[in-house]
Image (cartoon, helix red, strand yellow):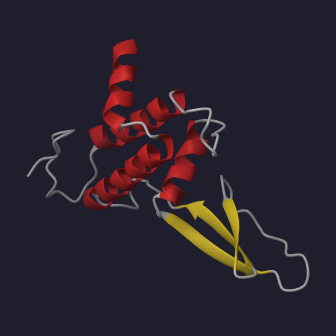
Amino acid sequence: MSCPVCGFDKRQSKRSVPQHRRFFGLLKAFFDHWPEYADFQPDNVDHLRAWALVRAKHRNVTIHDIGDGMTCIPSPGGYVFSTEYQGAIVILSPKSISFSEMSHQEACAVFDDVQAALEAETGLKADEVMKAVEEVV
């Protein structure tokens, strides 16, 4: 069975370079068309990637109980996002999408979830955004 987008044989365990390139192209296209009215405003494509992976639940979660005082929260490097939940600070950071960390099937699922998160946040459809970028190039 082949991927309808990149033609990669989905039964293989190794990752697809065309799929990986499409994912980063998708992020660039959404960044270039990001609506000003959206609550989240990415600084750059890497910031958008981190946010989208966290939104797609491909993330690490660290919970810090704040108790009655201040808590120092170390940053693992890169982008992190925080929220308060039941009296604790929850730190969310994107998990790796490196070739050595995920199989092709895992990457397909994560990339589909990221696309859904981007579409839900912006109201834009990935195919339309990607087509608009391809027409410019």
Q: Quadrant of the C terminus?
A: top left
Q: Residue at x 75, y 81 (%)?
A: 87
Q: Residue at x 42, y 44 (%)?
A: 119
Q: Quadrant of residue 132?
A: top left
In the rendered structure, the answer to whether residue 38 lies left or right of residue 98 reads: right
Seen in the image, is 84 located left or right of residue 124? right
Q: Position of residue 124 (x, y in %)?
A: 42, 36
Q: Position of residue 93 (x, y in %)?
A: 60, 62
Residue at 44% over, 40% down: 123
How many numbered marks appear?
A: 0
Outermost residue toward the bottom?
A: 67
- Residue 61 in the image, given as x and y percentages of width and height: 59, 72
- Looking at this rendering, what residue extends furthest in the top direction? 136
In the picture, measured across the screen, residue 75 lies left or right of residue 41, that is right
Q: Residue furthest right?
A: 69
Decide which of 79, 120 is in the foreground and name it. 120
Residue 19 at what x, y percent from top left? Answer: 29, 42
Q: Quadrant of residue 85?
A: bottom right
Above or below 91: residue 51? above
The reply to whether residue 125 is in sight is yes
Question: Is 89 above or below relative to 82?
Answer: below
Quick one: 16 or 118, which is closer to the camera? Answer: 118
